[in-house]
Amino acid sequence: MILTITLILSVLVSINFLLLRFSCNKTPNKTTSERPVVFRIENEPIMLAPTGS
């Protein structure tokens, strides 16, 4: 009984790994020469609201 359950679970796990291995989307690596856009924040004084405490 335990041997049957172990065997069934092992088969299901191996089928799961095979499906996971062969069903992955194979996307090509895109190598872009464009530089990422970086937003620079100028040093402005930060106005904080009064908290009342």
Image (cartoon, helix red, strand yellow):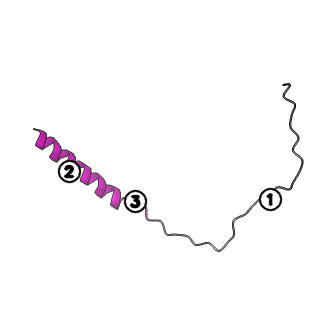
* Closer mark to the observer between disc 3 and disc 2: 2
Tell me which amino acid carries mark 3: Cys
Q: Nearer the viewer, residue 40 or 23?
A: 40
Q: CA distance from mark 1 to mark 2?
A: 55 Å
Q: Nearer the viewer, residue 6 or 12?
A: 6
Q: Nearer the viewer, residue 5 or 43?
A: 43
How many residues crowd mark 3 within 10 Å: few (<14), some (14–19), many (20+)? Answer: few
* Residue wearing tag 1: 40
| The furthest residue to the front | 53
Quarter containing the C terminus: top right
1 and 3 marks in contact (CB < 8 Å): no
| The furthest residue to the left | 1
Quarter containing the N terminus: top left
Give the residue drawn at x 86%, y 34%: 49
Place residue 17 in its image quadrant: bottom left
Q: CA distance from mark 1 to mark 3?
A: 38 Å
